[in-house]
Image (cartoon, rainbow, N blue to C red):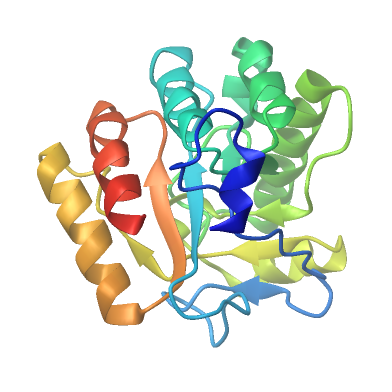
Amino acid sequence: PAWAASCPGRPDALGTSRTLVIDPVAHPRIGTMQYAETLPLRPGEVVLTFDDGPLPHNSNKVLDILAAECVKATFFLVGRMARQFPAGVRRVHDEGHTVATHSENHPLNFDRMPPDQARREIDEGIDAVRAALGSPVAPFFRIPGLRRAASVEDYLASKGIMTWSADFPADDWRHISSEQVAALALSRLAAKGKGILLLHDIQTRTVEALPVILRELK
């Protein structure tokens, strides 16, 4: 494919087919796991997304794997991780990936917490990632655990931030093998035909599954 020419020395690389620019106001909530619409993708197109980093040991391996194939992804980073590992945030950005946010502390009760606490989690997470990066971050947010609440979605929309769910997961947060992670990712993609894949760059099983997933996508 023509875009592989942009991967020097790797004419067989998977590459990235195109960059989609999305208006969060026009598309405030995306991902058919939870919402009515997803990104306007063509058949066979996959958007790779990674949650919960940066965690250097595994996140850097994920970035190495993506770089080897000249593949770009969107990373939903946790604020306290960004404070602890700011160089990891900068590497994601410097290698051409999209830097998005995933709350300050990754609580799994966004659907039940008081609205003011949810707003603090969102705002502090954005502030932490922005501070680590030294520049603005993408207006994209994924609710931890996908524990949605209308008040959270409304607050994000009021700030011009798009709420991202996904179209299919690979269950890589569960205690399953890397082979199972790859098989779930690929079978669910085959069933959907296109979409946003939810992965976690902090997981060792994901590091091990990713080369298989990319090879099969190619």
Residue at 47 percent of width and 23 percent of height: 64
Q: Is residue 118 visible?
A: yes
Residue at 73 percent of width and 42 percent of height: 120
Instruction: Give percent across and percent down for residue 130.
Output: 81, 30
Residue 47 is left or right of residue 22, and the answer is: left
Residue 187, placed above or below residue 96: below
Instruction: Identify which residue, 148 or 30, lies in the foreground.
Output: 30
Residue 191, placed above or below residue 53: below
Instruction: Give percent across and percent down for residue 5.
Output: 62, 44
Tell me the quarter of the picture where residue 137 sits.
top right
Instruction: Identify which residue, 85 or 113, lies in the foreground.
Output: 85
Residue 30, placed above or below residue 141: below
Tell me the quarter of the picture where residue 201 sits.
top left
Instruction: Identify which residue, 112 or 148, lies in the foreground.
Output: 148
Instruction: Give percent across and percent down for residue 179.
Output: 11, 43
Residue 125, placed above or below residue 19: above
Residue at 67 percent of width and 46 percent of height: 117
Tell me the quarter of the picture where residue 89 sits.
top right
Q: Is residue 102 visible?
A: no
Instruction: Give percent across and percent down for residue 99.
Output: 69, 39
Instruction: Report the quarter where the C terminus lies.
Output: bottom left
Question: How many numbered marks have been drawn onto this rendered protein structure?
Answer: 0
Considering every residue shown, the one lying at the far bottom of the view is: 36
Residue at 66 percent of width and 53 percent of height: 141
Residue 134 is left or right of residue 170, and the answer is: right
Residue 192 is left or right of residue 92, and the answer is: left
